[in-house]
Amino acid sequence: MAVRSAKAVWNGGLQEGAGTMRLGSGAFEGRYSFSSRFEEGTGTNPEELLGAAHAGCFSMALSAGLGRAGHTPTRISTEAKVHLGKNEAGLAITRIELACEGEVPGIDEAVFVEHAESAKANCLVSKVLGNVEIRLQAKLV
């Protein structure tokens, strides 16, 4: 099977330092800092990239499940909101909220939501994030 890679370089101390993250494919490279991760500063952060990975994985899993059931989607759009906060162990990713809209001819909302719940439970990124609460809002449009 495939092996994917990414690289991060951090220069300096935690609060005054800065770094870059780059996907092995070269499709993305971005700067990150303490401010972009824990405040509202300019740049990206690991949680944002995790959200993109989760949204992409979930959308593909939902499309696959619908397709296996004979309901090829026209479009699946998913936004992931990754919540960084504190718990009893310290800083943590405390929750991920997936908001999904799908255009799927010939099915009703209940069938769509059933497939979305299955995709949430079974996409590879959801499985890796097993100890994080994942909430789903799915809507057929």
Image: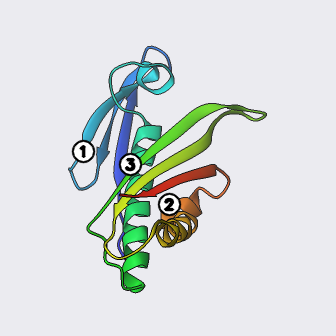
Taking the view exactly as shown, the residue that stands out farthest to the right is 88
| Disc 3 crowd, CA 10 A, few/some/many (<14, 14-19, 20+) | some
Cα separation, mark 3 vs mark 2, equals 10 Å
Relative placement, left or right, of 118 versus 51 is right
Q: As shown in the figure, which amino acid type bears the numbered disc 2?
A: Val
The residue depicted at 54 percent of the width and 63 percent of the height is 120
Residue found at x 46% / y 21%? 34
Q: Which residue is mark 2?
A: 125
Counting other residues with Cα less than 10 Å from the Cα at mark 2, is it few (<14), some (14-19), or many (20 or more)?
Answer: some
Residue 64: give x, y in percent of width and height: 38, 76
Residue nearest the viewer, comparing 107 with 37: 107
Per the image, the residue denoted by label 3 is 52
Give the residue at mark 1.
28
Q: Alpha carbon of mark 1 to alpha carbon of mark 3: how far?
A: 12 Å
Decide if residue 78 is on the left or right side of residue 24.
right
Q: Pick the residue in front: 138 or 44.
A: 138
Asked whether 55 or 65 is in front, the reply is 65
Q: Are marks 1 and 2 in contact (CB under 8 Å)?
A: no
Q: Quadrant of residue 60?
A: bottom left
The residue mark sitting in front, 1 or 2, is 2
Rendered position, 88 above or below 77: above
What type is the residue that disc 3 sits on? Ala
Depth check, front residue: 14 or 52: 52
Amino acid on which disc 1 is placed: Phe
Helix, strand or loop at mark 1: loop
Q: Quadrant of the N terminus?
A: bottom left
CB atoms at circles 1 and 3 under 8 Å apart? no
